[in-house]
Image (cartoon, helix red, strand yellow):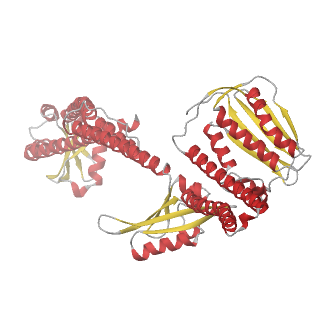
Amino acid sequence: MRSKARPLLTYTILVIIVMVSLGILLAQLTRSYFITILEERISVESEYFVTYVEGFLQGEAVTRDSLNNFSEEINTSLVFVSDDGEKLIDTVEVNEEVNEETKDRIINLVNQNEEEMREGKLVEDVFYYPLPQTIGDTSGTLILISPVDSLSNITKNIWLIIGMTLLIGLIAIFFIGFNVFANYIRPIRAAAGVADELAKGNYKARTYEGHFGEAGQLSRSINILARNLQKMTTSKGMQENQLEAVINNMGSGLILIDEKGYIQLVNRAFIDSFGGSRRDYVGFLYHDSIPFTAIHETVQNIYMFEETVSETFILPLDIDRKHLEVTGAPIFSDRKKWKGIVLVFHDITNLKKLEQMRKDFVANVSHELKTPITSIRGFSETLLDGAMKDEQMLVQFLEIILKESGRLQSLIQDLLELSKVEREDFHLTIEQINMQNFLSDLVPIVQHHAENKNITLETNIEGHTVVEGDSSRLKQVFINLMSNAINYTGEKGNVQLDFKEYEDHVIVSVKDNGVGIPEEEVPRIFERFYRVDKARSRNSGGTGLGLAIVKHIVEAHHGSIQVHSEVGRGTVFHVKLFKEFTNN
């Protein structure tokens, strides 16, 4: 409020100073003017006054009464003081406007300033004019004293006029100032306030536009500027959010390095791959933040050749490894000025694994097919060379050929089965399965095999639980698991089939106390053709594809399979199946 009233107060004080100065100037000019007029009048009439005084002092026709009357008529007192200080003439007593005290003061002033004897002076409201004269043998000073009440009245009138003018002026200034403040100063201040808010980033600030003239134009321009800034900020914010969302949700890691080698941007995928947080990278030199020589060389090649470079390197992660392909490209401005480089990291681990799986699959299939085919061909050639004439050898060789052909057939059948369950259009025939009855029907199938090895087969599958699934495919799963448990358990061992029910799922466990699986081999047992003990697996008639088929069938039911094993103490497989089958 104080700042708003400051201009009006300043203008008011300025006007008061001007008006008071004008009053003082007019009063002084009026005073000087009156003194000049009186001096001229008395100077002209002085000879006439001197004649009267000479006539009185020389005893001629002028008497004291006539002299007093004369002084009273002209309203001017006459005082003649000799050089000896004697007052020879004094008509002050007939003039009521001049008192004795003023007269004595004037006489003292005249005696003190003899060199200014020809100048009139004003003492209070009385004007005196000294005239040095020699009348006869008497020398002295004739002092003409005249009251000037009109001068005081005029001065009062001047100050009264100035006061009224000042009052009217102040009122006019108030209204004019208020109008100027309302129409110009206040809009400008409001616009300045909005400009300050805009400078602080508050682009929602607005000012009133109902003013006219330049102030109104300023208000409208400020509001237009605010709206444009708000639109630009909103648009820029949306673009930044969209760009940030795109960069952070990229499946590939991204890093932006400026022309000096400092990291300016990293996305979420990059942090997920390399670890740490944004503050560990942004603002630091790339070779200090990224401890991989392959990346350093890629960046240096881009700086050196100024062209797109692609490299492949391996990123070690604890006990695992991740294969990354980094593609880097230089960044130039519109004027071909170097701005930095951008690196994109593509995770090709799955592609590498797929390629390795394909190589392993071809190698394993070739190896698995080679053994029975070689055996069949070798024994066939032996028979053709004459061994078939020996009946005992003929029967033995034919049995070996039959066994190897059966093994070959089993291998091909498992390959076809695995290929079928891995296809995207693999179809399950979903039905309601009573799990207790279902598992009970499977036990007799493997019971004979267990009895041949003197293995005890225990079951704990009580209850009545209905699960949705494909019974024929689930039959493959549990027969395979129980057969493996029997195959890898020594004589007089124990195999246990357990069933547990939960709110929305069931868990079927197949447990044995056989040879077990080494801990480092457990993650690989579901790979195709992978065998922990290759010689033992072949002797048991396994193809190395059974667990791979089991895993695919369980996952097709949206379930899961887990393995816990200790070498020499046995293995347990847990199959989790949901009661309701969903296609999501």
Q: Nearer the viewer, residue 399 or 296?
A: 399
Q: Nearer the viewer, residue 268 or 550?
A: 550
Q: Position of residue 58 (x, y in %)?
A: 13, 45
Q: Quadrant of residue 160?
A: top left
Q: Position of residue 206 (x, y in %)?
A: 33, 35
Q: Residue furthest top?
A: 464
Residue 456 relative to residue 169: left or right: right
495 vs 73: above or below: below
Q: Quadrant of residue 71?
A: top left
509 vs 533: above or below: above
377 vs 453: above or below: below
Asked whether the viewer can see residue 93, the reply is: no
Q: Residue at x 24, y 47 (%)?
A: 81
147 vs 291: above or below: above
The quarter of the picture where the N terminus appears is top left
Q: Position of residue 341 (x, y in %)?
A: 43, 66
Residue 171 relative to residue 406: left or right: left
Q: Residue furthest front?
A: 389
Asked whether the viewer can see residue 431, the reply is: yes
Q: Nearer the viewer, residue 513 or 42?
A: 513
Q: Residue at x 27, y 37 (%)?
A: 219
Q: Position of residue 59 (x, y in %)?
A: 13, 42
Q: How many numbered marks have been drawn onto this rendered protein structure?
A: 0
Q: Residue furthest bottom?
A: 304
